[in-house]
């Protein structure tokens, strides 16, 4: 039986964020446990979606007879859904398969929002300090950019 412990099924990873495996997405590792009544001979990780992956032999360490843990060298996620299949084979040729789905969000583009209204500061007697407020008129910059097409008051 193959059980993946990290990342959890249907995990959502975002680039430039550090995660529990110590890596920063889109780099990550799969890790988990394999149990069998016999001798486990091989654990292979394969990217099934998107297509074009290759077999990766996992690094295994035996914790007890018929029980071992696995991990792998860092894998790279592609934008969107990534599906990996982990297959463990025992000495009799029996295979146990586990499928892991991970969603990766690539946020390399920055969103910039500009306001067309001018800000000014007003004195607030209650708090005894200046506070920012929006002026109720549109700036010339908005007219220049074509954001405003008619007069507003």
Image (tube, grey):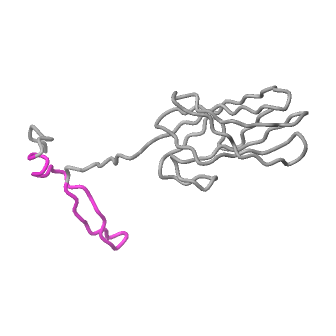
Residue drawn where x is 29% and y is 62% of the image: 132
Would residue 27 appear left or right of 92 to someone viewing this image?
A: left
**Residue 105 x/y as whole percent:** 47, 40
Residue drawn where x is 60% and y is 39% of the image: 11
Quadrant of the rendered image containing residue 131? bottom left
Residue drawn where x is 9% and y is 45% of the image: 143
Would residue 52 appear left or right of 6 to someone viewing this image?
A: left
Is residue 122 within the magenta segment? yes
**Residue 119 x/y as whole percent:** 22, 59
Q: Nearer the viewer, residue 125 or 75?
A: 75
Quadrant of the rendered image containing residue 87? top right
User: Looking at the image, is 55 positioned above or below residue 64?
Assistant: above
Q: How many marks?
A: 0
**Residue 39 x/y as whole percent:** 87, 37
Q: Nearer the viewer, residue 114 or 48?
A: 48
Range covered by the magenta-colored residues = 118-144
Residue drawn where x is 56% and y is 40% of the image: 12
Q: Main secondary structure of the magenta part?
A: strand
Would residue 143 appear left or right of 52 to someone viewing this image?
A: left
Quadrant of the rendered image containing residue 83? top right
Q: Nearer the viewer, residue 120 or 66?
A: 66
Is residue 6 within the magenta segment? no
User: Looking at the image, is 141 positioned above or below residue 120?
Assistant: above
Q: Quadrant of the N terminus?
A: top right
Would residue 50 appear left or right of 115 to someone viewing this image?
A: right
User: Looking at the image, is 118 positioned above or below residue 42?
Assistant: below
């Amino acid at each position: 039986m193959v059980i993946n412990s990290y990342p959890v099924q249907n995990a959502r990873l975002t680039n430039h964020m550090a995660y529990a495996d110590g890596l920063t997405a889109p780099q990550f590792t799969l890790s988990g446990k394999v149990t069998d009544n016999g001798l486990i001979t091989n654990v292979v990780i394969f990217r099934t979606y998107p297509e074009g992956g290759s077999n990766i032999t996992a690094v295994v360490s035996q914790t007890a007879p018929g029980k071992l843990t696995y991990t792998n060298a860092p894998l790279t996620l592609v934008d969107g859904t990534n599906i990996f299949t982990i297959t463990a084979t025992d000495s009799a040729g029996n295979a146990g398969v586990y499928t892991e789905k991970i969603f990766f969000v690539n946020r390399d583009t920055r969103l910039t929002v500009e306001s067309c209204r001018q800000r000014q500061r007003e004195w607030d007697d209650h708090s005894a300090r200046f506070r920012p407020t929006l002026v109720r008129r549109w700036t010339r910059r908005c007219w220049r950019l074509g954001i405003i097409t008619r007069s507003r008051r």
